Amino acid sequence: MSAHVAAPEFVGPRAGTYDPTPYAIDLNEWPRIVTKTLPGPRSNELHARASKYIRGLSAQVRLFPVVFESGHGCTMTDADGNRYIDFSSGIYVTTLGHCHPKVSEATAAYAHKLMNAHDFTTEIKVRLLEKLAAVMPGDLEGIQLYDSGTTAVEAALRTCRAATGKHEFVSCFGDFHGKSGHSISLARMNQFSGAERASGFYMVPRPDAYRPWWTRPDGSLDTEKYLEFYDTAILESATGRVAAFVLEPIQGWAGSIMPPDDFFPKLKKFCEKREILLVADEVLTSMGRTGKYLCMEHWNVVPDVVTIGKGFGNGFPVTAMVVRRPYADAVDKISASTSYGGNPMACAAALASIEVIEEEGLLEHAQQLETLFARRMADWTARFKIVGDTRVKGCLMGVELVKDKSTKEPFDEAGKRIYQRAFSKGLAWIPAGHILRMSPPIIMPDEVAHKAMDLIEESIGEVERELGYSQ
């Protein structure tokens, strides 16, 4: 067998409701491992060459240093011809699958026509702005375009300061907002060696139903206690100059941790009462990942400022900050433009991505996949002694691994082994210590989703037995 295998046929979109035909694969052929060991010899060679120069590799690469060569739909092929089901979407990026023809063709057209025009208006930018504003909830309509999530978050902070005349921020433990100055200050600092939190940044816990800080007498999570803590521990100790509360709707880096349904509606009222803006960092959760254009729509909450990215351009680096109408003029005060943000290629990729979501009915399909995944994971906590919790919203999932269900002690070693085991079976996905993270493309056919879940179930069972946990 040749090491380089043919990719599955991948044709254009079908208009209307979701049609799995363009994304179907032969599950006798995908996934398939053709080398005796993983990573294979070509991957090892290329990784060794790169390692002479590159530093700061992510945990997923360190744990499984495979070298990918191509991707089509919800599949990927490495440099040795090994074939994988993609269950990470390039870490939440290729939401519409790899090399979607409409997105690729739109981007390529402007690569041949006009690559950059700084922040001058172009027709393709106008079309994107109109389309993006049309799919945003409420009066979110003040838009600026960027090339990274971090840049969009930094712009959101500056906008909040300009809009309110205040300079402090509140954020949550476990959230992740980027890797530059103030975006780092919104996060737990031990993620970033050598970084120091800027003054005026405060952190609070956020509700986690599996690991609650405060509960009611019946043991259920008490959202009100969190809000009371925000008042007493943060707002009274701050100078009274809090411009915004900044949160991820669902924590990504921390392990797909989801809030109780009453949290964001109550937090929105909390912020309004105190004249604090609510910023939703939706770089990870936007553009169909959870079955909505914005995850905040699940709770009928319109944030004052929102950042979007990752799946926005389905792999092309394009992000955005979007501001509610009452605060949109503040964007004019912060020197908001960037060299690369809103370039014609980026606008073409983003516009095509939104059009694909609409034309193929992918928001609805992501919600249907949520039902499938929820059913598959429904009994995992009962079947597996090391699975403490499972959670899913659209095509965003997390599985929390513990050494003991009564103590809930995190089981990092199990997470590492299960990640590597499933990868060796042909599942490309994401590790997060003791939490398994999953973010498949929202185009994924049901039968491929079932196959991926089979691989995860097998891997959990095998590793559980190896670690001495009898079922």
Image: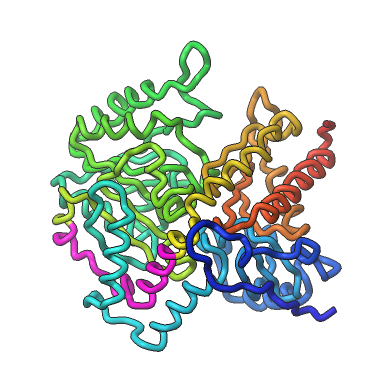
The residue positioned farthest toward the bottom in the image shown: 112
Q: Which x, y percent locates residue 26? A: 75, 65
* Residue 395 inside the magenta-drawn segment: no
Does the rendering let one see residue 59?
Answer: no
Q: Give the magenta-colored segment's residue range.
A: 331-355
Applied colour scheme: rainbow
**Above or below, comparing residue 428 to residue 411 in the picture:** below
Which residue is at 67% across, 63% downward? 24
Residue 56's x, y, as percent?
Answer: 55, 64
Query: Quadrant where the C terminus lies?
Result: top right
Q: Quadrant of residue 388?
A: top right
Location of residue 445 with respect to 248 vertically, above or below: below
Task: Kindly indicate the quadrant of the structure image that contains residue 382.
Answer: top right
Residue ID at (38%, 82%): 110
Q: Where does the image place residue 70, in percent across and percent down from the top left?
A: 63, 74
Q: Nearer the viewer, residue 17 or 141?
A: 17
Q: Would residue 72 be seen by someone viewing this image from the given angle?
A: yes
Residue sticking out furthest to the top: 217
Along the line of sight, the residue nearer the viewer: 169 or 130: 130
Residue 14 or 349: which is nearer the viewer? Answer: 14
The residue sitting at 73% across, 67% down in the picture is 83
